[in-house]
Image (spheres, helix red, strand yellow):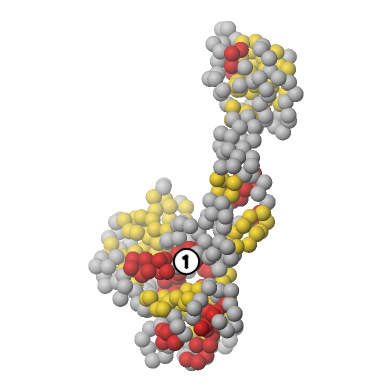
Amino acid sequence: MLSVEQAEAIILEKVQPLDTARDTEVIDLLEAMGRILATPVTSQLDFPHWDNSAMDGYAVRYADVQGCSAEKPAILAIVDEIPAGYQPQHTIQSGQAARILTGAMMPAGADTVVMQEVTRREGDRIFIHSAPEPQAFVRHQGAFYKAGEPLLPAGIALGATEIAVLASAQCNQLSVYRRPRVAIISTGDELVTPDQALQPGKLVDSNQYALAVLVAQSGGIPEMLGIVPDEPEALKSTIAKAVASADMVISSGGVSVGDYDYVDAILASLGAEIHIRAIAIKPGKPLTFATFSQSGEIFSSPPSPITHALYFGLPGNPVSSLVTFWRFVQPALKKLAGLSQFWGPNFVQARSHQELRSDGKRESYVWGKLQLVDGLYEFDLAGGSHSSGNLINLAQTNGLAVLPVDVKFIRPGEMVKVLQVGSPLLN
């Protein structure tokens, strides 16, 4: 049985990002939120585009105001008014100034801005009572970015700030990676869909819905293939079709050592290379990770655009399924989608409000609420049973506290590593 760290290393080593030559598409800027940039972006524009004022005040020649004071102010003639978006009409000569507003283009001849708070205006004359520093409050052309240099690298997720930069650079169309296709399968004779009548002994399939949401949040396109009964041929047929058409397949259930757990044997019969069968994690020990390559027969009929596929067989218990997705599948999906770095889970150090307990045999995850209080994280353990089958108290939580192997308890007030699975609450 592999440690969590060993399993994570194997998975990320086997995951190869989508191909930049084959797996990209060109989209409009307005569609780019959350997408992964496939090629580096440069701009032919300088930032700032031209010298401009960082302050409301007066554009002057520094030589005209050097050494002035309240007792001996510099007196200059105002020859222009320059609001933002206006092209200056005058060259500032010795003894002259221009009224200028924040962001406005600097006039030729001026090299310094005097802020209005140290001036007094009388008609078309300005009295400057305090000498500025040379080139004060001037944002120079190209100071932030010079045309032709790298602007944004490939392999980054595009959020609001990146899209703002691209809009400023007039990049109206972008090359991004396509979203990975992720097939989701639930296995088990005991499962029914939420709209079916619940008979004795049956369970409602929640995994398919939760995993679809998590896949979409992680940048993939979920393809829900429904419930497959514990029948080897039906399961083999569904898995084969899924692997041939999806970049990643996620199944839940059927990966333990029970009489009806067929997934590993089916994967082997389909030519998969199985890399992981069990991990020393609680909840989530029975986890299968396998890969399929283009050379396998499964890709040849019908012809498939997929060159390789990843397979994650997650445990059937709903909490185990979610925990293992957060810990192992989500990083793999982010790398597959084209992110160049920062695939891994986001861990923070938090102060625990309660005692946390484990048997110490496996790396254990317990769930609760993560809060940010005065700049420090705090963790509140969810009440109730921390059973792998209990979804109820997992709702409205956003963190999983981690108890390492051989650590049986963490005392109240002690620091604990927490896997962040949602935004921290602010207090």
Q: Position of residue 171 (x, y in %)?
A: 65, 49
Residue farthest left in this picture: 406
Q: Is residue 393 visible?
A: no
Q: Position of residue 338 (x, y in %)?
A: 52, 61
Q: Quadrant of residue 414?
A: bottom left
Q: Closest to the observer: 353 or 175?
A: 175
Q: Closest to the observer: 246 or 284?
A: 246
Q: Position of residue 73 (x, y in %)?
A: 60, 10
Q: Closest to the observer: 239 or 383?
A: 239
Q: Residue at x 41, y 78 (%)?
A: 273
Residue farthest front in this picture: 295
Q: Position of residue 147 (x, y in %)?
A: 60, 40
Label total for image: 1
Instruction: Identify which amino acid the numbered label 1 is placed on.
Output: Gln
Q: Quadrant of residue 288?
A: bottom left
Q: Is residue 28 visible?
A: yes
Q: Residue at x 38, y 76 (%)?
A: 275
Instruction: Characterize the local packing of mark 1: few (<14), some (14-19) or many (20 or more) Cα atoms within 10 angstroms.
Output: some
Q: Is residue 276 above or below residue 37?
A: below
| Quadrant in the picture for the N terminus | bottom left
Q: Residue at x 44, y 87 (%)?
A: 269
SS state under label 1: loop
Q: Is residue 80 above or below residue 413?
A: above
Residue farthest top in this picture: 72
Which residue position is annotated with label 1? 16
Q: Residue at x 73, y 23 (%)?
A: 81
Q: Is residue 102 above or below residue 145?
A: above
